[in-house]
Image: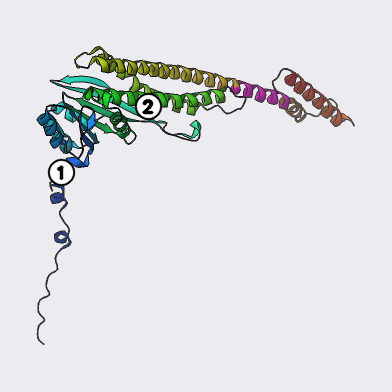
Amino acid sequence: MPSLPPRPSLPSLHSLRPSTRSAARAPKVPVPTARAIVDCAVYVDGIRLAGKFTHSAAIAEVRRRGDGFVWVGLHAPDEGQMNSVAECYGLHELMAEDAVHAHQRPKLERYDDVSFLVLRTVSYVEHELATTANELVESGEIMVFLGRDFVVTVRHGEHSGLSGVRHRLEQNPEHLALGPTAVLHAVADHVVDEYLAVTSSIERDVDVMEEEVFSPDDHVPIENIYLLKREVVELRRSVTPLSMPLSQLVQGVDTPVPKAIRRYLRDVADHHTLVAERVAEFDEVLSSLVDAALARVTMQQNMDMRKISAWVAIAAVPTMVAGIYGMNFDNIPELHWKYGYYGVIGVVAVVCISLFATFRRNNWL
């Protein structure tokens, strides 16, 4: 019988499966910087030049003209994208790092000829009732890099768009002709206006909480008060630290701000002070509501204990009588009396009714 040819060996599963180690070592494909740029424009005498510019072509055009400035807007750039913009505009590496990682406190810093302003943005989440909300305030960041002939804005968060700010500025060429500091003022004013809108919405929720705490209903929304207080604390962390950077801008410390822009920034600082005071007031009111709610719960528990004690006292009368007559003695008074049972029941009923009337008169029942 002829022998069969040898069976060809199949490739192993390990040889067919791509190596995860080699995949992990695969170089990361860089994302073009244009993906992170929301808008890039050149402004001369407050008028936007026609055409589209890349971030490098825009600054080259301004410096070729020797007039105007560039406004580049980015949204959540990665490290490579931000480094490309930083190299083109001469931004310090620490500034670029802060712009990528975000989570910065509001601050104003100066690196050589470039000012760096960080603002925390807030947005109010609409909901049907404050009692059903999980998150009332969302926060984000806007970072402004201010140079002699450029302004770069980097924002993190979906609610902090600046397209409306750019559109309003382009409709006011006289103000935009003041230079990059006009953009700085417009961004700061937009952020503080959002603070005012959020505080107005939170004020309505605080009023609702106050009505619920002092309403005659038995339900006391302590957990909801704590929820709202937590959101107010988050709002305070975003709002309060901005007072120092605004003060530095108004006074012109470390940042050359024209006198005309300082007047506008002073108005922004006044609005910010109003917001900070309202946030501090909300915190105090909510703390008072927590104390009032806890006092009301304590009072309700005391009332419940009084009711329970009153019913226990009433129930103790028949229990005591039944315990006495349930003892195994032969000579118990009135045990063999014909009307003994009815007499005991009557005495117990009279005592229980008397106790009920007494407790009811004293508001224990």
Q: Residue at x 42, y 24 (%)?
A: 199
Question: Label 1: which residue?
Answer: 30
Taking the spot 29% from the left edge, 29% from the top edge, the residue there is 169
Looking at the image, the residue that sits furthest to the right is: 338
Q: CA distance from mark 1 to mark 2?
A: 35 Å
Label ID, residue 209: none
Q: Is residue 101 magenta?
A: no
Which residue shows up at 39% across the image and 19% down it?
Answer: 275
Q: Is residue 312 magenta?
A: yes
User: Could you tell me the amino acid type at mark 2?
Assistant: Glu
Q: Position of residue 80 (x, y in %)?
A: 15, 38
Neighbour tally class for label 1: few under 14, some 14-19, many 20 plus, Cα within 10 Å: few
Query: What secondary structure is found at the residue carrying circle 1?
Result: loop
Q: In the rendered image of this protein, does residue 208 appear above or below residue 39? A: above
Q: Amino acid at mark 1?
A: Pro
Q: Which residues are magenta?
A: 300-315
Looking at marks 1 and 2 on the same chain, the residue that comes earlier in the sequence is marked by: 1
Left or right: where 198 falls relative to 345 = left
> Would residue 101 appear left or right of 322 to someone viewing this image?
left
Q: Confirm whether residue 118 shows in the render.
A: no
Q: Quadrant of residue 159?
A: top left
SS state under label 2? helix
Outermost residue on the bottom side: it is 1
Residue 301: image location, x then y, percent: 59, 23
Q: Which x, y percent locates residue 323? A: 73, 28
**Residue 3, picture quadrant:** bottom left
Q: Nearer the viewer, residue 343 or 1?
A: 1
Q: Which residue is mark 2?
A: 194
